Image (cartoon, rainbow, N blue to C red):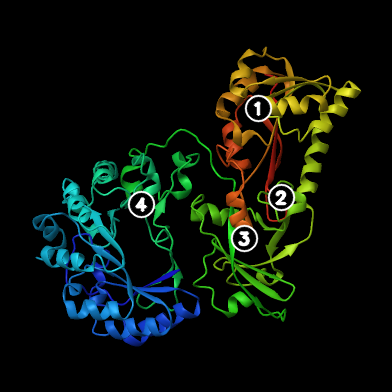
Amino acid sequence: MKALIKVGYACNEHCTFCHTQDVRAIQGEAAEVEAKIRRAHALGHRMVVLSGGEPTIRPELLRWAALVGELGMGFGLVTNGLVLAYAEVRERLIELGLAYVYMSLHAGDAAVHDRIVRAASFDTALAALQALSGRGLALTVNCVVTRQNLAHLRGLVDRVAELPDATLKFSATEPKGGALRLIDVVVPRTADAAAAVHDALLYAATRMPGRARHGGFPLCLLPGFEDAYDDLRTHAYWTMVEIGEPDLVPVDDRNHVHPAVCDDCRLRGGCPGLFTVDHARHGVADLRPPAAGPVSNAFDWVLETVAPVDDDGVCPVLAQGIAPFERARHLFVRHAGKLARYRADTRDFTDADLERIKHGAGQVYLDASRKPAVDDFGRDLVKLQRAALCGPCPERGRCTGLFEPVFEPVFERDEAALRAALAGIRGDVLELGCGEGRLATLWAEAIARGDVRLVGVDPDAAALRRLGPRLPGASLVVGEAEAILPGIDDASVDAIVIAHAWNHLRSPGAVVEHAVRVLRPAGELWVADDVPFGLARTPRQQRAAHRGGATWQHLRNHGASQAHRAIEGDALVLVERRDVGPDTSNQWLLRYRRSPA
């Protein structure tokens, strides 16, 4: 994992889009930078990358590179590359262990590039880039897409294609610093920039296959290149630090927003969304969310370290400093005299989603099984909750938290409560998505008593064949709910049950519309499903899970609130609601009654 350390904001260029244009006079003290390098080592980082401003203009550069090497870490630079054109500096840095260079070049010709950086630097930068190529470095050429170079991206592809070991990245201009001040002159509309980048990526696919990437653009605007997304996390950064900050802090994407139109987008987890300024200026008009598709309902925190710890009333997380640890992506678990640290690098969920899952819904579990895929939640998973120490802590809302196992059968308890609630249903019942047979015993007993006449619907024909012998007397129909419901008579059903299938429906709105029609007055609609959860796993468990045959079946990850917004209306009156919380499993429940009117 990398640490990005800012050494100061002075620079030998003056880019129109510069984020730090207002603080260029600020330079970090050498002692401050060295202390942060040592802190990165203490945290277990494998590489330190210096940035600015321009880090190569600092006279301490070689000393800092040597220190990083002495501590056993790799060394990298985020740079405009001008100083690296000088052979004596470049070669000495490579001798000291330079392994990673993220270098700016904003066009394929001097006139456009120099106009953007406001310096006659193109030839020098290109010479540095050519000298770095072929030296075994991880080499990325970063192009910030502005109004000035929008029509010149293919020319840069041609330049970088000549360097067989370089990756080219097209970055969206963040409306910040100089770019914010000159936003109408410098920053292109998101859709216009994405269209130009898409064209350049198509061109790069022929000129330099697999070596062109993009960052900062909504993924829905770059169809076919969703997997070419690139940001600090894809470069394995864990922390970063500005001048004056007392400690390293996690990298994040909190300068972006995912508007409501993105809620059910299958690309949401790995997508940056819109810059908040862009959203405020233009709304969501530029977005093109794709049709619903499979999304993950779970993610892993993977074990990083285990150390002995005393249960002496002192919080072991606070003791090592909470600033570098991500509130959602790190997980500390204390049990039996040991403290385990886990980390989630998933791109299936945004940081905001992960924080809601971990700290809001409290859906944190330890995978106690040895299976490739968890198939018995009650036996395989152990609930993890915030430790009692966290309760009165003033840092509770900022800290990643200390978690401990709670040996309670939350899944069995909540599933039993659902079955008990459904046991009171009488009459003509329609279950949508019945194939897993989770309610088969309940329905079989009700059918045998004569209390229920059941029609079960599921698109999986094989699942219904297996279910048939368990439900004698039931009518089982193969098909999707959206296709079957239109053929059911008005006011012919006493209860509709959608248990663990709401998030699998292709068109929940259409299902609700038909449910209103086919329910008898005072008939009931029951909806229960699961919110996403996180699993604490060892690397071996994660590898086994990835090799397993688990498939993504969810089309959305609605909780009770989102489902209620889709269902509520004059025709259906909410009777009961059970939300997910830190002391429950991940199952929620909504129950509605058809209005007599």
| Residue 163 sits above or below residue 24 on the image | above
Picture residue at 50% right of the left edge, 76% below the top: 43
Picture residue at 55% right of the left edge, 55% below the top: 354
Type of amino acid at the residue the image marks with label 1: Asp
Ranked by sequence position, the earlier of labels 4 and 1 is: 4
At numbered mark 1, what does the secondary structure look like: helix, strand or loop? loop
| The one of 471 and 589 positioned closer to us in this rendering | 471
In space, the residues marked 1 and 2 are separated at their CA atoms by 27 Å
In space, the residues marked 3 and 4 are separated at their CA atoms by 37 Å
Type of amino acid at the residue the image marks with label 3: Arg
Per the image, the residue denoted by label 2 is 585
Q: In the rendered view, does 141 fall on the left or right side of 414? A: left
Q: Where's residue 555, x and y in %?
A: 55, 37
Q: Where's residue 51, x and y in %?
A: 31, 72
| Residue 478 sits above or below residue 261 on the image | above
Q: What is the quadrant of residue 572 in the picture?
A: top right
At numbered mark 3, what does the secondary structure look like: helix, strand or loop? helix
Circle 4 packing at 10 Å, graded few (<14), some (14-19), many (20+), is: many
Per the image, the residue denoted by label 4 is 275
In space, the residues marked 4 and 1 are separated at their CA atoms by 42 Å
In space, the residues marked 1 and 3 are separated at their CA atoms by 32 Å
Q: Where's residue 499, x and y in %?
A: 70, 34
Picture residue at 28% right of the left edge, 72% below the top: 52
Of circles 3 and 2, the one toward us is 3
| The one of 238 and 559 positioned closer to us in this rendering | 238
Per the image, the residue denoted by label 1 is 460
Circle 1 packing at 10 Å, graded few (<14), some (14-19), many (20+), is: some
Ranked by sequence position, the earlier of labels 2 and 4 is: 4
Which circle marks residue 540 in the picture? 3
Of circles 1 and 3, the one toward us is 3
In space, the residues marked 3 and 2 are separated at their CA atoms by 25 Å
Q: In this rendering, does residue 496 appear at all? A: no
